[in-house]
Image (cartoon, helix red, strand yellow):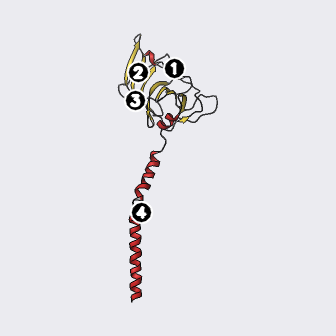
Amino acid sequence: MSAWRDWIGSLGLMGWLLWSSAVVYSPALPKILSLKEQAVDAQPTMERLLMALIDGTYQFCTEPDPQDWRDGAGACFNFVKQETTLDGYYGYPHSGDFICLRGQVTGDWLSGEGFVTSWAGQSWIEVPPEEIVWDREGRLFVSQADVIQHEGRISQIVFRQARLDLQGLYQYPESRMTSPTQLCDWSAL
């Protein structure tokens, strides 16, 4: 009988040790969870990637570099980075479809303002009264339009609110599109 008592006592002791070890190691669980949370938080955002770049001119597009004669593929954001400000344009290479943008990057979004200029092949008949999605990709949202008229026609539309989703854009090795300083003259507004 005493052998059974000793064996049951041993099981009880082993059970208690197992339970107490779980209690002793349970404080480690929050550390493991916080490491996982840190890994998720450490995912690179465009803000982190862009702020790591030195000041200069860059080109990011919705499609990878075609590595041919084209200046870019898909819709492209060609910009000058100056400290925390991006100043450039977003549009389609080899077309007149583009909008000038400037602003700050937060997370994966450029937030600021934009403007478009009317020209013979690209004129605006009316100004959108509310926020619109400017591009086919659904990345650029503009609103709060102010019209600058010249000779009774819409000459420029300034959007006081512009938001561009930068997530998933491909960085090209060099900017091949027309310089933003040639296309976007903010001083004329």
Residue that mark 2 sits on: 158
Q: Earlier in the sequence, mark 4 or mark 3?
A: 4
Q: Earlier in the sequence, mark 4 or mark 2?
A: 4
Q: CA distance from mark 1 to mark 2?
A: 15 Å
Where 2 falls versus 111 (above or below)? below
Q: As drawn, is 56 to the left or to the right of 29?
A: right
Q: Earlier in the sequence, mark 1 or mark 4?
A: 4
Split into 4 quadrants, where in the image is the N terminus?
bottom left
Residue that mark 3 sits on: 132
Residues at discs 4 and 2 in contact (Cβ within 8 Å): no
Q: Which mark is residue 78?
A: none
Q: As drawn, is 93 to the left or to the right of 7?
A: right
Label 3 CA crowd tier, 10 Å (few <14, some 14–19, many 20+): some
Q: CA distance from mark 4 to mark 3?
A: 54 Å
Where residue 107 appears, as percent x and y from the top left, is 44, 37
Q: Earlier in the sequence, mark 1 or mark 2?
A: 2
Q: CA distance from mark 3 to mark 1?
A: 22 Å
Label 1 CA crowd tier, 10 Å (few <14, some 14–19, many 20+): some
Amino acid type shown at disc 4: Tyr
Q: Earlier in the sequence, mark 3 or mark 1?
A: 3
Numbered disc in front, either 3 or 1: 1
Q: Which mark is residue 25?
A: 4
Label 4 sits on a secondary structure element that is helix
Numbered disc in front, either 2 or 3: 2
